[in-house]
Amino acid sequence: MNFNTALLHGGVDKKEKYGSTLTPIYQTSAFYQQSAEDLEGIFSNKTPGYCYTRVANPTVTAFENRITKLEGGVGSVATSSGMSAIFCALTNILESGDEIVSSSSLYGGTIDFFRDLEAFGIKTNYIENNNFEQIENAITENTKLLYAETIGNPCLDVTDIDELAKIAHAHGIPLIIDNTVATPYLVKVFEHGADIVINSTSKYINGSSNAIGGVLTDSGKFKWNKEKFPILKDYIKFGPYAYLAKLRAGLFRNAGACMAPQTAYLNQIGLETLGLRMERQCTNAGKLAEHLEKRYPNIIVNYPGLESSKWHGIGEKLLNGGYGAIVTIRVGSKENAFKLLDELELAYRLSNIGDTKTLVLHPSSTISLHSTKKQKEDAGVFDDLIRISVGIEDIDDLKEDFDKAFKGIGLDA
């Protein structure tokens, strides 16, 4: 199936009892069984079925199946948030003394989480994205994974996943990619060698900012071995399902990281229009970036689709059908940034991306607030930076809104 057809039909069970085109919301904490033996079988993973929504739920399973089909993996686990998806994806294979090698241009919340891992004896070595010599030098015998975002948030650097995968696999470690900003619409990361993909469903998958969630998907292609990953020793027998088997049998259910049934239902509704929304949002972002760059030479405009972007080349090679829906601008000072944010009328000032509406944010004082000065600079966060998550509005109205705002603070052309 092509992309939009797959969104509607891929992984969908058309044998629903009453003919519903979406799996209904099973809004229940636990599930009744016909016998004690049946319940025992489900708890021991010997009988298919549902016992408790913290472990699994039919509505959530339906969403997971659609994501698995879309990504081309062997299975998915939906979680309570994008951050819980990152938590589950990494700690499923990490132990005290292990190390992560990661791109330094990450979402601020992820950097905060990596700092939290230090208390458990897990160290993160940050490297400049796509600096392959630096990556090679950072990998040690304790390194258990490489981590990066397809498009950095808010740096907007584009990761060369193919090259990163080669390095990871040469060292016998998996490549984990956060694909939230790009989504499967722009790139199927498994086709480029990634092993596990993470998406914050709160963003483009949901599309309407009405539910917090996350999902991770395993390609099933990485060859786990008990010498390098002793934490997986009891699950190697499951072959391509080893990683997911361990996650579902332990950390995921024990941490209570489950997605709510209502959220899974809302995400399925959003998922069906992902392609249409991304097409429009990427187009709008490109046009807005071109307009701002041309009209306001006194500001710095960053967007991978611009030929002036140093990530334009890798974006052209990796991404399909657009360069993402986020534009960043630098306006000279924090004072200018705050004034401009307050002047905008159509754009919403809030900390999310991927909504149908255009959203704006000052990252340095919000999502990257707890990062050090160096971490901010490495992640492309500066005091005068504004992040614009471009929506599906008519582009002429967006241009006019920004033009009025620039005029209102005296930065017009």
Image (cartoon, rainbow, N blue to C red):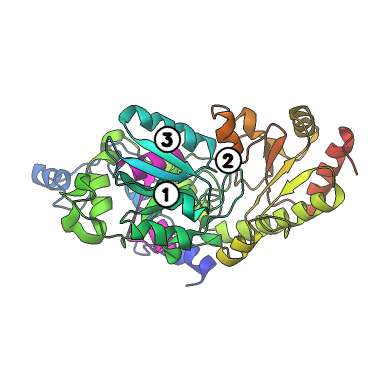
- Asked if the residues shown at circle 2 and circle 1 are in contact, with their CB atoms under 8 angstroms apart, the answer is no
Asked if the stretch drawn in magenta spans residue 81, the answer is: yes
Q: Residue 255 versus residue 163: which sits nearer the camera?
A: 163
**Residue 379: which disc?**
2
Q: Residue 270 versus residue 320: which sits nearer the camera?
A: 320
- What percent of the width, then of the height, locates residue 147? 43, 48
- Amino acid carrying mark 3 in the image: Phe
Q: Quadrant of residue 324?
A: bottom right
**Residue 137: which disc?**
1
Measured in 3D between alpha carbons, the distance from the residue under mark 2 to the one under mark 1, in whole angstroms, is 20 Å
Q: Please say whether residue 137 is visible from this viewpoint.
A: yes
Along the polypeptide, which appears first: circle 3 or circle 1? 3
The residue located at (48%, 55%) in the rendering is 132
In what element is the residue under mark 3? helix
Which residue is identified by label 3? 114
**Residue 145: which disc?**
none
Q: Residue 79 versus residue 125: which sits nearer the camera?
A: 125
Left-right relation of 252 to 67:
left
- Amino acid carrying mark 1 in the image: Asn
